[in-house]
């Protein structure tokens, strides 16, 4: 927290406007959309109780019905793909490529060949690294599919200068406690259409029809963000670029620190600027040391690290779901088997990070 957050929160208290909805929500939506939009582009935001709620409403807006196939990023956090099940849709997973660790456009093309009936694609920008957006967008357009962009980890990341979350028909970001900015919890749905935004608002506020009494013709949800929470988000948004710059420095220090080791940092394209939400490493293939050895060594030194997101096709809950790949092996299984997320918090000092780097070095 920086200070501005509490002044927006105080304003909510002073005006005695603590409820869901309210001036902080309205302003937060507008300010975030201004941040994300290209010049001349109009985006419509809806502040919600979580990124997961935003994903759920995006899946509904995309028209996913019982039995519909949705082509999804395979290596991600489960929240990306769970909302498809809420609507009775069926996830077909798509393997990653090695240049950004995100959905491989070639595998997506193959998935459309296999499942020509698929009309929705769920894409994540993992760890804040933008996916191959030109290729992914081209494949989606050619197959007439709706693209939903999960930018929960990628707020402030850009691809060819355009903000992650602003590519798809629907984009979502998260303000959960672990994300690049936080409102304590919450999310935003971003849409290119005002009508879609308004429809999502209707669902998020219990689907109340226009009538003097409580009239319901559709199932609704209580997904709105509170005016207090939105105040925290507004204050944080003022520091988003500063958070990103600090994350970029952390990534650079790791890259520099590991340069003579059989270690690679999570890759990105020259045409993109990741926010480096998490700095991740993989150990070279031939190396005898496993990521769990490093995990244990870091843990012994009281340093927390995490394995890479375990691919969805390896999760028991998605047993039996197809996962489409173009290489002989699953690229994401390979990355998962050699990768580790490193401490990336912007409150970490240079000395603390030097200790992380030294501890990793000692493993070799
Ligand atoms: C955090 C996260 C979400 C969910 O956001 P919440 O606000 O925690 O519901 C979705 N997708 C990805 C990739 C995430 O990292």
Image (cartoon, rainbow, N blue to C red):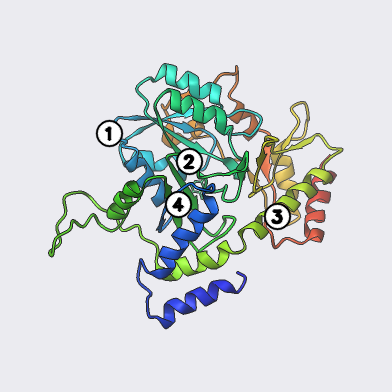
Labels 1 and 3: the sequence-earlier one: 1
Q: Does 320 sit above or below residue 208? A: above
Quick one: label 1, few (<14), some, or many (20+) residues within 10 Å? few
Kindly identify the residue that appears in the image at 37 percent across and 76 percent down: 17
Q: Earlier in the sequence, mark 1 or mark 4?
A: 4
Residue 299 versus residue 149: which sits nearer the camera?
A: 149
Residue carrying label 1: 66
**Mark 2, secondary structure of its residue:** strand
Report helix, strand or loop for mark 3.
Answer: helix
Q: Quadrant of the N terminus?
A: bottom right
The residues bearing labels 2 and 3 have C-alpha atoms spaced at a distance of 23 Å
Looking at the image, tell me whether mark 2 or mark 3 is earlier in sequence order: 2
Q: Residue at x 48, y 54 (%)?
A: 33
Which dot, 4 or 3, sits closer to the camera?
Answer: 3
Q: Which residue is mark 2?
A: 149
Tell me if 291 is positioned left or right of 239 in this view: right
Q: Which residue is mark 4?
A: 51
Task: Tell me the distance, in whole angstroms, between the alpha carbons under discs 1 and 4.
Answer: 22 Å
Residue that mark 3 sits on: 245
Count neighbours of disc 4 (C-alpha within 10 A) and say few if under 14, some if 14 to 19, many if 20 or more.
Answer: many
């Amino acid at each position: 927290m920086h200070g501005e957050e509490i002044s927006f929160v105080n304003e909510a208290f002073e005006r005695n406007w603590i409820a869901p909805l309210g001036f902080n929500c309205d302003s937060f939506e507008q300010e975030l959309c201004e941040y994300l939009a290209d010049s001349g582009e109009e985006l419509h935001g809806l502040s919600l109780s979580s990124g997961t709620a935003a994903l759920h409403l995006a899946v509904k807006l995309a028209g996913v019905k019982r039995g519909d196939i949705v082509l999804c990023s395979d290596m991600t956090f489960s929240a990306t793909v769970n909302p498809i099940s809420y609507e009775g849709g069926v996830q077909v997973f798509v393997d990653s490529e090695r240049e950004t660790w995100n959905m491989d456009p070639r595998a997506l093309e193959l998935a459309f060949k296999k499942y020509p009936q698929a009309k929705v694609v769920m894409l994540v920008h993992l760890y804040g690294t933008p996916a191959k957006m030109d290729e992914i967008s081209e494949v989606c357009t050619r197959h007439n599919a709706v693209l939903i962009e999960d930018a929960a980890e990628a707020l402030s990341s850009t691809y060819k200068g355009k903000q992650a979350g602003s590519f798809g028909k629907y984009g979502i970001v998260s303000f959960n406690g672990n994300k690049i900015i936080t409102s304590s919890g919450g999310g935003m749905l971003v849409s290119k259409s005002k009508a879609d935004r308004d429809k999502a608002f209707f669902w998020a506020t219990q689907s109340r029809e226009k009538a003097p009494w409580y009239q319901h013709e559709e199932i609704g949800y209580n997904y709105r963000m509170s005016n207090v929470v939105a105040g925290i988000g507004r204050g944080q948004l003022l520091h988003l670029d500063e958070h990103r710059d600090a994350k970029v420095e952390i990534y650079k220090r790791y890259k520099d620190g590991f340069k003579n080791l059989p270690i690679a940092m999570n890759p990105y394209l020259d045409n993109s600027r990741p926010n480096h939400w998490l700095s991740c490493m993989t150990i070279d293939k031939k190396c005898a040391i496993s990521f769990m050895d490093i995990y244990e060594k870091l843990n012994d030194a009281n340093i927390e690290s995490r394995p890479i997101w375990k691919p969805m096709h390896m999760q028991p809950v998605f047993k039996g779901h197809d996962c489409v790949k173009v290489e002989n092996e699953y690229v994401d299984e390979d990355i998962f088997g050699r990768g580790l997320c490193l401490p990336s918090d912007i409150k970490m000092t240079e000395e603390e990070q030097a200790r992380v780097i030294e501890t990793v070095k000692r493993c070799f």
